[in-house]
């Protein structure tokens, strides 16, 4: 019945509420919230907050009643970096931007960029040696950054610009993650080392991208890239294009979404395969049988079902973001409870996709749970690694294709093993959960499939 009491999370502190738990042990905390019920009340500082944990209620927020919610506190903080990009914008403006950007990330454009993904992956893998210990998290961050910057800017970023983006992105993401769960906004303004580093990284990013946009206006690229497409794109309903300021916002959004998100997912996929050799063997057998001695192409991706299952299971265990927020614009009934206008409403994709009532043995890496027979038995709204509804990630298909191409290139050439220490990786939770240092040992496959001579 609407108006009934919402269960509360115990263990908060005066003036801080549960902010310390959410900040210190975020993944454990959101899973503890999930265990308390479909909706659970808690506090962030002096602010009331609610965790929504049931897939039907999450769908109501993201799809059925999406217009009754704004993105809320987490995305307000995101405006410090992405300003009014697709990640943070609201209402009619968000829909306009999505209409402009979505066509740039459809099948034809993804197909166009597949060759670049493959070329850059080959170049990275060519530097590895048989038996070498590789910091896979760093390698895949560098590769993901190279892929997104080549797609966005062609070859215009240059070494200095690339170095600036590499320095800035992790600092900005860490800063945004801290700000989203801070109990009071005043902490953002204190003269701390973290706040200084954040401001410096933001200024660096701003300078690099503004210079590239200005250069693009003066000297249009000879080859088509996403930046040129953004500058030329028009709203199909109004015929209007984007200002340089709006192009900047969307470029920053794409850099954030296309680098750490993809790098994190790829790193976890490699890590999980290295610790499940029977799954890695099966995936390599599928790649060899389907591709023979040729290289992977875009049209192959749909013909590699076990590769897609490995990607799906990796994204279930390690989704592109661990937690998102919304805020109702008016009082709204959700799951028999009334949530007040302006409240902080949290939902955790990480906790949802590890719910044992939805996924048997949820912590087990089991790509076969995505076989057609077993996948049909899963709750259709319990798997949302890229979000859902009108605010779901516009670049999801691009990211999935990039993961598939890069994994294919790596596994055709090398087999992955844990390094000698055997030390497990752990999630480092920022805005996007990234793995800790991940050294893996790579061993050259006997026949070296996917090597240079087959391209």
Image (tube, grey):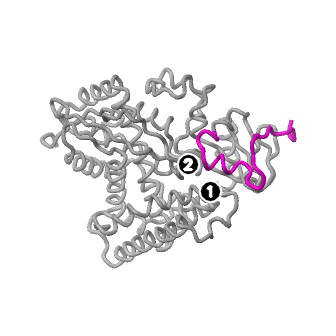
Crowd rating for badge 2 (residues with CA inside 10 Å; few <14, some 14–19, many 20+)? some
Q: Which of 366 and 21 is in front in this view?
A: 21
Does the rendering let one see residue 240? no
Give the percent coordinates (x, y) of residue 116.
28, 52
Residue reaching furthest front? Answer: 421
Label 1's element?
helix
Residue drawn at 33 percent across, 44 percent down: 136
Nearer to us: label 1 or label 2 = 1
State the image quarter where residue 445 is shown. top left
Q: Nearer the viewer, residue 346 or 63?
A: 346
Give the percent coordinates (x, y) of residue 124.
25, 49
Give the percent coordinates (x, y) of residue 282.
32, 24
Residue drawn at 52 percent across, 57 percent down: 174
Give the percent coordinates (x, y) of residue 422.
36, 33
Asked if the residue under mark 2 is in contact with the one under mark 1, i.e. CB atoms within 8 Å, the reply is no
Quadrant where the N terminus sits is: top right
State the image quarter where residue 292 is shown. top left
Question: Which residue is under mark 1?
Answer: 180
State the image quarter where residue 275 is shown. top left
Q: Does the magenta stretch include residue 25?
A: yes
Crowd rating for badge 1 (residues with CA inside 10 Å; few <14, some 14–19, many 20+)? many
Q: Is the magenta stretch mostly helix, strand or loop?
A: loop
The label shown at residue 30 is: none
Mark earlier in primary sequence (1, 2): 1
Q: Is residue 8 above or below residue 357?
A: below
Label 2's element?
loop
Residue drawn at 31 percent across, 63 percent down: 224
Question: Which residue is under mark 2?
Answer: 392
Magenta region, residue range:
1-30
Quadrant where the C terminus sits is: top left
Residue drawn at 60 percent across, 29 percent down: 379
Relative placement, left or right, of 429 versus 335 is left
């Amino acid at each position: 019945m609407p108006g009934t009491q919402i269960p509360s999370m115990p263990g908060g502190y005066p003036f801080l509420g549960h902010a310390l738990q959410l900040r210190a042990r975020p993944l454990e905390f959101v899973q503890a919230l999930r265990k308390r019920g479909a909706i659970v009340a808690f506090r962030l500082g002096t602010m009331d907050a609610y965790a929504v944990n049931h897939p039907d209620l999450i769908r109501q927020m993201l799809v059925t009643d999406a217009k009754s919610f704004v993105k809320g506190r987490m995305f307000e903080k995101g405006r410090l970096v992405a300003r009014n990009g697709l990640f943070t914008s609201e209402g009619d403006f968000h829909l306009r931007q999505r209409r402009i950007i979505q066509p740039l990330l459809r099948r034809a454009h993804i197909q166009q960029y597949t060759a670049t993904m493959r070329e850059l992956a080959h170049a990275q893998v060519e530097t590895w040696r048989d038996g070498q210990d590789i910091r896979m998290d760093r390698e895949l961050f560098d590769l993901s950054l190279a892929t997104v910057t080549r797609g966005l800017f062609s070859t215009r970023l240059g070494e200095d610009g690339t170095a600036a983006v590499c320095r800035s992105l992790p600092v900005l993401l860490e800063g945004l993650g801290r700000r989203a769960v801070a109990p009071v906004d005043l902490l953002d303004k204190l003269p701390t080392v973290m706040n200084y580093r954040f401001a410096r990284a933001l200024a660096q990013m701003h300078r690099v991208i503004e210079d590239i946009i200005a250069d693009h206006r003066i000297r249009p690229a000879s080859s088509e890239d996403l930046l040129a497409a953004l500058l030329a794109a028009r709203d199909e309903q109004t015929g209007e294009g984007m200002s340089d300021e709006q192009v900047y916002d969307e470029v920053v959004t794409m850099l954030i979404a296309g680098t750490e998100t993809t790098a994190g997912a790829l790193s976890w996929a490699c890590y999980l395969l290295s610790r499940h050799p029977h799954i890695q063997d099966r995936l390599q057998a599928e790649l060899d049988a389907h591709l023979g001695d040729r290289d992977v192409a875009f049209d192959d991706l749909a013909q590699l079902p076990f590769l897609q299952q490995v990607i799906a299971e990796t994204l279930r265990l390690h989704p592109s973001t661990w937690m998102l927020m919304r805020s109702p614009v008016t009082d709204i009934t959700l799951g028999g409870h009334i949530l007040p206008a302006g409240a902080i409403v949290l939902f955790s994709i990480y906790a949802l996709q590890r719910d044992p009532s939805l996924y048997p043995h949820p912590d087990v890496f089991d790509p076969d749970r995505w076989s057609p027979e077993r996948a049909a038995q899963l709750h259709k709204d319990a798997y949302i690694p890229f979000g859902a509804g009108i605010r779901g990630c516009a670049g999801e298909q691009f990211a999935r294709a990039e993961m598939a191409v890069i994994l294919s290139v790596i596994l055709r050439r090398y087999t992955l093993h844990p390094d000698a220490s055997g030390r497990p990786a752990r999630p480092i939770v920022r805005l996007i959960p990234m793995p800790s240092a991940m050294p893996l040992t790579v061993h050259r496959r006997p026949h070296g499939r996917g090597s240079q001579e087959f391209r």
